[in-house]
Amino acid sequence: MTVVRDSAAPSATRPDPLVPARRPVARRRVNAAGTYVLLMGLAVLFAGPFVWLVLAALKTKAEWVAIPPKILPEAPRWGNFTDAFTEINFPAYLGNSLFLSFLYAVLVTFSSAAVGFGFARLRGRGKRPLFVVLLSTMMLPQILTLIPTYVIFARTGLVNTYWPWVLWGLAASPFLVFLFRQFFAAIPAELEDAAIVDGCGYGRIFLQIFLPLSRPVLLTSFLLSFTWTWGDYIAPALLLNPDQTTLAVAISAFYLDPHGNPDATVQAAAATLYVIPVLVIFLFAQRYFIRGVLGSGVKG
């Protein structure tokens, strides 16, 4: 007797093509372990310089110049942090850095948001080529504009004042403009149309609708621009006198031993204190920072 096999019935040994193949649990665990090992290695790589800085801040001068180098200090010298406060007017330079960083961050965030809103929502001829020109300025090395910028500020009498940071903030940042433009372009047009029907102008739409919706990007822009100014050395060194300069310049230039040589261990202690505020701000705001960066890439 011949048995006729139904060709439509699924074979017991042939996998169903509509069901995705499942990777073995062991393989997934190995991949996860490899990912964690890679991330831990990168974390150690990026944290290494900061750990070295902290260890240098706790060494004595003899341990700093010892050959072969000593990685761990025999007895941590916490007095280096006290010397960092007393050898220079640390609070005054810290206040100058905070003021300039906060001033520039607020101004450039608002101006960049306004320009990004214009590129995202307003209509006009030449908008796309103008946006391309704006983005192309990000490829221009900053060192090329350093001397012309200084000459302009010197001839207009703005050296040794805080006006350069005000003008830079009002001029907006191409990168932040791109960030805001991407975020605003992803907001549904129906929201804008409904506001226009209700009689809102574009200024009111920007201030009362789009800005409240862009809090993650606003915080991201503020953090980025704050750290740019906080870590800037060249502009304060060129444009401000020693009494008005920032903490970055003071740490690199004003910690000297009796022979006029850099006091390396005290500099390391001051640099450690200099880095901590930015780390604390990022740790508390990292969730909004990541959300702002990801939200700005939703729509091109």
Image (cartoon, grey):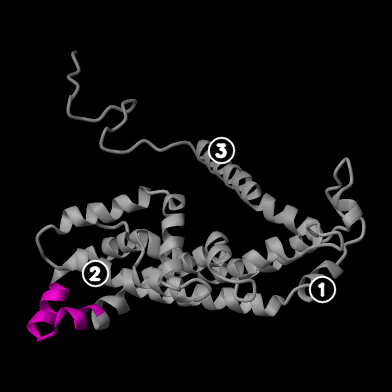
**x%, y% of residue 167?**
39, 72
Query: Is-magenta flag for residue 196?
Result: yes
Q: Which residue is mark 3?
A: 30
Span shown in magenta? 190-206
10 Å neighbourhood of mark 2: few (<14), some, or many (≥20)? Answer: many
10 Å neighbourhood of mark 3: few (<14), some, or many (≥20)? Answer: few
Left or right: residue 246 versus residue 116 is: right
**Distance between the alpha carbons at the discs numbered 3 and 2:** 46 Å
Mark 2 or 1, nearer chain start: 1
Q: Which residue is mark 2?
A: 117
**Distance between the alpha carbons at the discs numbered 3 and 1:** 49 Å
Magenta segment's dominant SS is helix
The label shown at residue 160 is none
As shown in the figure, which amino acid type bears the numbered disc 2?
Phe
As shown in the figure, which amino acid type bears the numbered disc 3?
Val
Find numbered disc 2 in the image and state the secondary structure of the residue it sits on.
helix
**Residue 90 can be seen, yes or no:** yes
